[in-house]
């Protein structure tokens, strides 16, 4: 944890957390509620890589990787313990698995009005479409179409929500 994040960690109420994140460069929309959310890879883009829209809710123990940008549009909910990854890497450049699993860095976008359930993992480069619902415990490996319920490991479409 960087020294700049100490006041954020000490802030006991969501409005103070939001204020501190704004001061450090994040875009936090009006009415957004961030509970005990953690960030890592701040040295790559800083909090300027985080955009949280209006009336979003981020539950306790969410973990957000800021190696690349993370954009949560208006009225997005991340339930408890959601993991948002913007990079994967098996290790150093000479690691024997690099040729099979090269490192990847890509932004994550959750479009307006979507819900991401408890314990979900969003992998690098995914886009959760507008008004979609990701069931608890799912691992999202590819884009979710708008207005779709997805579930499972890996997450698959269950039904349309239109």
Image (cartoon, grey):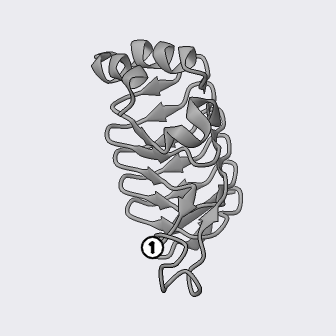
Quarter assignment of residue 132 = bottom right
Q: Which residue sits at x=28%, y=16%?
A: 12
Residue furthest toward the front?
94
Q: Which residue sits at x=38%, y=20%?
A: 8
The secondary structure type at the circle numbered 1 is loop
Looking at the image, is 98 positioned above or below residue 30?
A: below
Horizontal placement of 99 versus 36: left or right?
Answer: right
Looking at the image, is 50 positioned above or below residue 111?
A: above
Q: How far from the left and from the top, in percent, is residue 2?
A: 39, 29
Of residues 125 and 44, the one drawn nearer to the viewer in this rendering? 44
Name the residue tied to disc 1.
152
Q: Which residue sits at x=65%, y=44%?
A: 69
Quadrant, the N terminus: top left
Looking at the image, is 145 positioned above or below residue 96?
A: above
Q: How far from the left and from the top, in percent, is residue 21?
A: 50, 21
Q: Which residue sits at x=68%, y=45%?
A: 111
| Number of numbered discs overlaid on the protein picture | 1
Horizontal placement of 50 versus 8: left or right?
Answer: right
Horizontal placement of 31 versus 48: left or right?
Answer: left
């Amino acid at each position: 944890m960087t020294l700049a994040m100490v006041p954020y960690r000490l802030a006991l109420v969501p409005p103070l957390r939001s204020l501190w994140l704004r001061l450090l460069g994040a875009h936090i929309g009006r009415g957004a509620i961030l509970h005990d959310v953690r960030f890592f890879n701040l040295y790559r883009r800083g909090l300027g890589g985080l955009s949280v829209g209006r009336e979003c809710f981020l539950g306790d123990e969410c973990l957000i990787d800021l190696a690349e940008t993370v954009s949560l549009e208006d009225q997005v909910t991340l339930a408890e313990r959601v993991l948002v990854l913007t990079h994967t890497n098996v290790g150093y450049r000479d690691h024997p698995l690099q040729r099979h699993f090269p490192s990847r860095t890509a932004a994550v976008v959750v479009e307006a009005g979507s819900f991401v359930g408890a314990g979900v993992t969003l992998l690098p480069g995914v886009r959760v479409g507008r008004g979609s619902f990701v069931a608890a415990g799912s691992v999202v490996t590819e884009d979710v179409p708008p207005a779709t319920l997805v579930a499972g490991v890996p997450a698959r479409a269950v039904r349309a929500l239109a």
